[in-house]
Amino acid sequence: MNADIILLKYGEISLKGLNRPVFEKKLMSNINRALAPLGKFSVKRSQSTVYVEPLSDDIDMEETVERLSKVFGIVNICPAVKCEKTMEAIEKTTVAALNQMDLEGKTFKVEAKREDKQFPMNSPQICQHMGGVILKNTNGLTVDVHNPDILVQIEIRKEAFIFTQKVSGAGGMPVGTAGKAMLLLSGGIDSPVAGWMISKRGAALEAVHFHSHPYTSDRAKEKVIDLAKIISEYTGEIKLHIVPFTDIQLDIIDKCPKEYLTIIMRRLMMQIAERISIESGSQALITGESIGQVASQTMESLAVTDNAVNIPVFRPCIGMDKEEIVTISKKIDTYETSILPYEDCCTIFVPKHPKTKPSIEEIVEAEKLLTDPEGMMNKAIEEREILTIK
Ligand code: ATP
Ligand code: MG
């Protein structure tokens, strides 16, 4: 079917009561932002539905649907044809749309929804009538009301809309309706998924990456930039802070007991991320940690890491198995980039026998051996590179 308009259905936003216009307005502006590179569109909303209509013939509808499928807040995407609200027009338009499709040997069913109660036929009558019209005016189709190949959906609203395809949207809430959070973005599988999950709930994202040049290469840095780009297709613009971390790591290795290396490194990462957040208006940190995944992600280690900062730390992958995280990373298209083999600063400096159950007291004691953590953190923040990813 060659669609000339796209209907977008949203779910959770419609439950928002008096605040609903705020969410709808944000959704509309995010849709406009996502579609702007493709050309001019009319984007209007009425009764929990957004109508997206291209304003020129050369706009690629497949690409339009693809982009809309990455806008949080949309539950279903229905490419449709529209016509006047008369039975005659609906018959003609439906038959013409179906006859563009390969119908041979296929089954179908009609579903109707009548938002406009003034329309002379009710929904069951429309279904029955249109079932007959379709059978008479197409070839190859038979009816199957239980498991049809083609579900012909007819919605009577301000106009009539006919569609056979319902693409799943990204769900969630519009980005920008839940503040802003700072993602600690490594090159691994977990952190891009964690950022995506929090943004799905409406948070705009900023990201920080700790880079250990020359122990980690420019390609490792490029990989993180690529990951941020993929996530930004969902979240919109991301400010990425690339923080030089080598001096801090070398000082930790030099001064502190080996088994504490990772946990102290993580505490300093969190503190730097917290400071950048305060400066830039992010209200929480996000990490890809999951209980028990590695030594630095035991309950004890997580408690010691949390203790380094005052800002809330969101860990949406906390209760997920690796396999579940991988499934999401494949769905959002970060997986293939995440598994590229470039080294990460954490893996390079991993101790052989990390402490799995550190206490806050022993870690704070060990950190006293560092040369000048305050000065080193400030220097790293000052020397960071800031990129705008879109
Ligand atoms: P994977 O386990 O797939 O490598 P990961 O990189 O997320 O994923 P860890 O290395 O254990 O796992 O790190 C835990 C979390 O710490 C990450 O999810 C990320 O949020 C943060 N992190 C780790 N290394 C860095 C880094 N170099 N820059 C920014 N954040 C980092
Ligand atoms: Mg990692």
Image: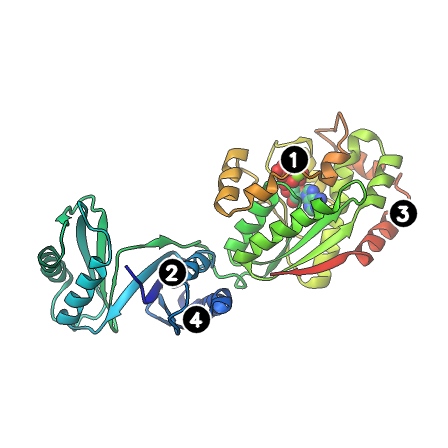
Asked whether, in this view, residue 291 is left or right of residue 74, the answer is right
The mark nearer the N terminus, 4 or 3, is 4
Secondary structure under the numbered disc 3 in the rendered image = loop
Residue ID for mark 3? 372
The mark nearer the N terminus, 3 or 2, is 2
Residue displayed at 52% across by 61% down = 175
Amino acid type at image mark 4:
Pro
Asked whether, in this view, residue 232 is left or right of residue 243, the answer is left
Whether residue 302 can be seen here: no
Residue ID for mark 4? 21
Q: Which mark is residue 297?
A: 1
Give the Cα separation between the discs numbered 1 and 3: 26 Å
Q: Nearer the viewer, mark 2 or mark 1?
A: 2
Secondary structure under the numbered disc 4 in the rendered image = helix
The mark nearer the N terminus, 4 or 1, is 4
Q: Horizontal and vertical percent for residue 114?
A: 20, 65
Give the Cα separation between the discs numbered 4 and 3: 50 Å
**Residue count near mark 1 (Cα–Cα under 10 Å), binned few <14, some 14–19, many ≥20:** some
Give the Cα separation between the discs numbered 3 and 2: 52 Å
The mark nearer the N terminus, 2 or 1, is 2
Furthest residue toward right: 371
Residue ID for mark 2? 10
The mark nearer the N terminus, 2 or 4, is 2
Whether residue 54 can be seen here: yes
Picture quadrant of ligand 1: top right
Q: Which mark is residue 81?
A: none
Give the Cα separation between the discs numbered 2 and 1: 37 Å
Q: Is residue 142 above or below residue 47?
A: above
Secondary structure under the numbered disc 1 in the rendered image = helix
